[in-house]
Amino acid sequence: MSATRASHDVVVVGAGSVGMPAALALAESGHRVLVPDARRGPGHGSHKAAIGGVRATHADAAKILLGLRSREILSTWRERRGDDLEWVTGGYVFPAWRDQEASTLRALLAAQRAAGLDVRWLDAEALLEVVPDLERRDLVGGTSSASDGHCSPLLAMEAFRAHAVRAGVELRFDEPVTGVEVEAGRFVAAVTPRGRHPARTLVLAAGAWARELAATWGQDLRVRPDAHEAGITEPVAPFLAPLVVDLRPGPGSANVYFFQHQTGQVVFCLTPAPLAWGDDTRETSSFLPLAADRLLAVMPRLASLRVRRTWRGLYPMTPDGSPLVGESREVGGIFVAGGMCGQGFMLGPALGELVDRVLRDAATDDDRRVLEALSPYRTFASDERLK
Ligand SMILES: Cc1cc2nc3c(=O)[nH]c(=O)nc-3n(C[C@H](O)[C@H](O)[C@H](O)COP(=O)(O)OP(=O)(O)OC[C@H]3O[C@@H](n4cnc5c(N)ncnc54)[C@H](O)[C@@H]3O)c2cc1C
């Protein structure tokens, strides 16, 4: 036991896509929560770079479970809590122009539907009814998931922050956690340049920067940052409902995805190939020409759009493209919730609730399935097919 009486039950490291929803869920179930963040405000890490895609349409059961719950939280937020997150149930479409992608998508369908997703395979003609402007040449068909959608990461963060503060969460910015104090193999306090923060539990939600901190208590957390760029166009009249993902690899990129925001702008992003390892968030001059070529191959009509700006942020990447969730084996009282790769915004709200249930010893059977699949100590033998 620590000599100092703790004024908090839980220290959540990082006010990001995962940490802020976790802090909210923990505080609303009665925990006294402290959230120190190294940066100047909430969501200033990877969160603010996210474009806002929210899907339950994943390839594996654990992410589908989290995705379904996050989608429910975000899509019903306005009616339940009052804040407008600019949620749009526009759906997700994965078109295929080649047999490779068509086979990948079709092979996933049975398991996805069994897991509760309303995903359907549409032939080219039916797909063009959902997205009329897709490139028609060689279009084979594709999957459509009508209940997925998108919303504003910035509005969502502000909503989570406001409700968390109302529920009693203490936020401290410009305050990096530099280490932990451990007694008899258990976490007793988080250490920052401003002092020590005793608590029963530490939740590590430090995103792309988590590995360094975990190393201070001897845990080799398999997460490292890689950089992804995104862009936004001028606003135009509505012409596109779903978020479109083109899974074809091309020179310099592994895929491209985009949607039209409810205020008219088209927001787009691609996965570079090879991945751009490191934490450099300066935009490159190569991204826009690359993205433009890819976007026009999916939808020639986009040629008339003018791009307003681009930005670059970090994915907290893991060896198999799936998150790292679970208790530390090295030190008791530490729970890892990270390695969110390109999906932390869409998985964070559900993960926050899961963290709260685990800390209350109220994990469900589904939670146990998620924890087993996403264990930080797994062998990383598989590869995520819908990254
Ligand atoms: C261009 C781009 C587009 C994306 N689009 C989407 C999308 O459409 N949908 C989606 O779901 N995801 C998307 N993502 C991915 C998403 O942004 C990340 O997966 C997510 O933000 C990670 O959440 P996190 O909470 O783990 O990390 P973060 O949101 O980065 O939060 C971690 C926090 O921890 C803090 N921190 C780190 N170390 C310390 C420390 N030692 N002490 C205190 N604080 C610390 C950081 O300052 C940060 O605030 C996108 C990412 C990029 C780059």
Image: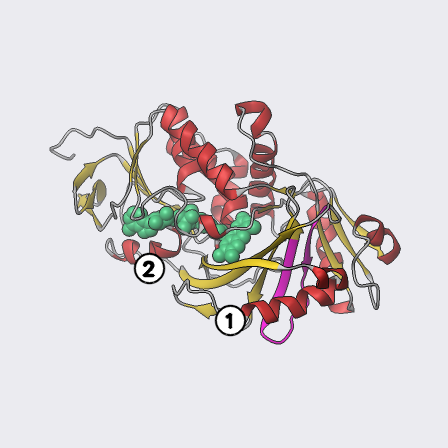
Quarter of the figure with the N terminus:
top left
The answer to whether residue 323 of the structure is visible from this angle is no
Name the residue: 25% across, 30% down: 8
Classed neighbour count for the residue bearing mark 2: other residues with Cα under 10 Å, few (<14), some (14–19), many (≥20): some
Residue 254: say if magenta. Answer: yes
Q: Is residue 73 left or right of residue 338?
A: right
Q: Which mark is residue 285?
A: 1
Q: Position of residue 221 (x, y in %)?
A: 36, 57
Residue 181: say if magenta. Answer: no
The magenta region covers 241-258
Instruction: Specify the amino acid type for callout 1.
Output: Ser
Disc 2 vs disc 1: which is toward the camera? 1
Instruction: Specify the amino acid type for callout 2.
Output: Asp
Name the one closer to the observer, 72 or 203.
72
Name the residue: 72% across, 46% down: 237
**Residue placed under numbered mark 2 in the picture:** 220
